[in-house]
Image (cartoon, rainbow, N blue to C red):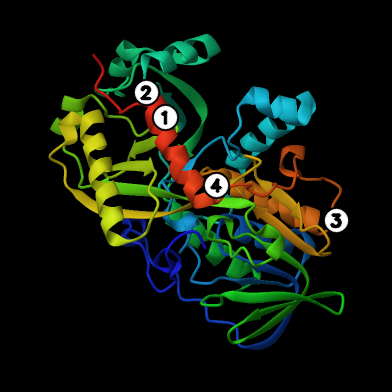
Amino acid sequence: MLYEPTGHDPRHWPDSYWRATCPPLPACPPLAGRVEADVAIIGAGYAGLNAALDLVERHGARVVVLEAAQPGWGASGRNGGFCCLGGAKLDAARITRRAGPDGAAEWEAFERAAITRVEDNLARYAIDAQVTETGELMLAASARDWARMQRAGGELLDTGRLRDEGLDTAVYHGGRRTRAGFGLHPYAYVTGLARAARAAGVIIHGQSRVTRAEPAAGGWDVQVAGGVLYARRVLIATNGYSDERLPRWLARRILPAISNIMVTRPLTRAELQAQGWTRHLMAYDTRILLHYFRLLPDNRFLFGTRGGLSFRPAPVAAFARRARAEFEMIFPAFRHATTDYAWNGLVCLTASLAPYIGPVPGAGGLWLALGWHGNGVAAASEGGRVAARALMGEGTAPPRLTRRAPPRFLLPRKPALRAGMALAGLIEGPLRPRA
């Protein structure tokens, strides 16, 4: 475990805006005794619940989901609510080099299908996830990034167009808009999936942290404190909150990284107009330790930052002060808006910089679906469905980019992460107001 146990404690829910504004899901009871299923799923987030729904709806399988806390406790209930393109940390050229032109096209189709998957889930299961406007904006954090963005092309917005379209800041040099994706309430989405899964016959056990998974009579015995679940097939969909001993093959193949979010009080019309940011569009910047933000339906402002190396109170508070200062630099007209909610959680990176949807080598019937690189709302939703179909032996395989098993990180991960953050700071320098 790279971080303090407090960051993984299922008894402690984050002080999130999402939990405060969504009816709680009735508690799922812990597993007790010996239970059997066709498929065991570990993790009740987007990937695990989408897999469970697909297995029941397409195959009529008996599915049991085991969750260490309750559905929505992890990243699926505490992220920024960006349903967007993404899932890999590779640009288009590197994806093409790795997977070939056909593989790159396949991955692009997966990304777009993933957004459609979320749209379909919201409609099919009647989930009110407070969807906001379509599209996403990438903002250039420096003049150099803006020049690079202009060379790459796309729908470009210079500072004048950003101002005209209600997307003005004091920092960014321009932006590129993508007409795909939308914002949503992530906890409403994941708890809506859990309700739909239970209605479809999926059994979900909360407070059921898996301690061991062992081969047993053509399947697997999955052990928790209160009992054992036997299943012919097992899907592990725990992402940044994975126990790397389950299976041991996973050890050092993922890198959980901390992401932080704050949400302000509702902004007044005067504040929004003074800043020139009046749109409910998802946005993020080009920095390695990026900022991501959006105006919520009730005009609160969500501001997220990557970074931090500890869940201890003092470092968390210090990072929150830095993030707040950057928020006020980017949006000076919002500087008097108090922070009403602040929390953090883990995203999951891999050494391959791509998700992995595939079997654990040498462990028949044991599969993984994880590594969404901070863009799991859509990618994990579709990735869970794809994993379920592959697990059941359907003809369509996961996208080839996701079939490469991630190698192990060679260097100690925490020092490497610290060094990487320091290097990023040296290369990019501090965020500065635009001249």
- Where residue 160 appears, as percent x and y from the top left, is 30, 11
Q: Are marks 4 and 3 in contact (CB under 8 Å)?
A: no
Tell me the amino acid under the disc marked 1.
Answer: Arg
341 or 19, nearer to the observer? 341
Disc 2: which residue? 141
Task: Count residues near mark 2 (Cα–Cα under 10 Å), then give few for <14, some for 14-19, many for 20+.
Answer: many
Hey, what amino acid is under mark 3?
Gly
The image position of residue 313, as x and y in percent, is 28, 61
Q: Secondary structure at mark 2?
A: loop
Residue at which label 4 appears: 376
Separation of marks 4 and 2 at Cα, in angstroms: 24 Å
Q: Which residue is mark 3?
A: 393
- The tag earlier along the polypeptide, 1 or 2, is 2
Q: Earlier in the sequence, mark 3 or mark 1?
A: 1
Residue pointed to by mark 1: 287
Which one is earlier in the sequence, the residue at label 2 or at label 3? 2
- Please tell me how crowded label 3 is: few (under 14), some (14-19), or many (20+) other residues with Cα within 10 Å: few
Q: CA distance from mark 3 to mark 1?
A: 41 Å
